[in-house]
Amino acid sequence: MSSDTSLEWIDNHCHIPPGHDGDVWVESARAAGVSKMVTVGVTHERSVEAIAVASRHDGVFATVGVHPHDATDGMDGIEALLFADKVVGVGEAGLDYHYDHSPRDVQKDVFAQHIALANQHDLPLIIHTRDAWADTFDILDAEGVPARTVFHCFTGGPDDARAGLDRGIVISVSGIVTFKNATDLQDAVRCTPLDMLMVETDSPYLAPVPHRGKKNQPANVVHVGAAVAELHGIEPAAVAHATTQRAITFYALSS
């Protein structure tokens, strides 16, 4: 599949490495028509790295947070990072009951702390949830869903999508949408209004078809967008425009 570099895309969730490799990713993404990228923190150390990467590149922004896998590390120092230049969101944070790398009660507590930070600072909340939909919604409802909230790398079905949409939560789609066996996700994308969708790579993970099995990078978000377009029966240009505008508004992105 060839990409139309006249289209503007935003990869709203990736993990750009520091140093030369990250520089190459950003250059390749721009050549593919990806104008902006949000590189996401998953620990305090990785959040500091994300801020440093964003500082090196125009059009690259950072978020800070603690992934549920690392919830036992706690939240020390995360709030202070919110004031760094080009930080545009809180997370990724949430619940992961598939691996349970941190105890569930600790995951829940740390997730609630992220929600509180997003509400307190009026920042977007980036949620990772896996095999934990009921508890995710219960905690969000108890703490108050931030005005700008996204389910990153959404892997649920139509019912999960509708439950999120009913709460004003944006659905972000990764390369999984291009996998043949991802039928529940594909049905969820079909029932999600275009203006409530964003696209991502979650680089270096989850490379889309036709790059499945290789290390992913932000340039490949164009393939995610093309898959969304096919599911909605529209041209990729419409998806590029809608998801780019949503990401700009959601993260309050500048140049």
Image (tube, rainbow, N blue to C red):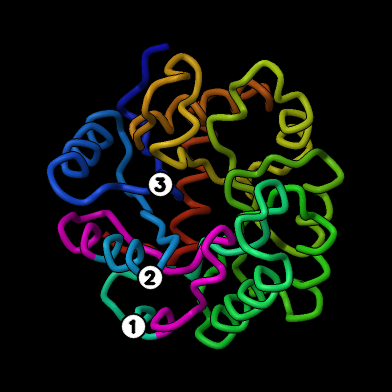
Q: Earlier in the sequence, mark 2 or mark 3?
A: 3
Magenta span covers which residues? Answer: 52-79
Determine the secondary structure under disc 3.
strand
Q: 122 or 208, which is in the foreground?
A: 208
Choose mark 1 or mark 2, whichever is in front. Answer: 2
Q: Is residue 27 left or right of residue 102?
A: left
Marks 2 & 3, CB-CB < 8 Å contact: no
Q: Earlier in the sequence, mark 1 or mark 3?
A: 3
Determine the secondary structure under disc 2.
helix
Local crowd at mark 1 within 10 Å, few (<14), some, or many (≥20)?
few
Q: Position of residue 179 (x, y in %)?
A: 62, 20
Residue 133: quadrant of the picture: bottom right
Q: Amino acid at mark 3?
A: Cys
- Residue that mark 1 sits on: 83
Q: Amino acid at mark 1?
A: Phe
| Residue at x-position 71% and y-position 35% | 189
Local crowd at mark 3 within 10 Å, few (<14), some, or many (≥20)?
many
Q: Earlier in the sequence, mark 1 or mark 2?
A: 2
- Residue that mark 3 sits on: 14
**102 up-or-down from 116: above or below:** above
- Residue that mark 2 sits on: 44
Q: Position of residue 10 (x, y in %)?
A: 40, 44
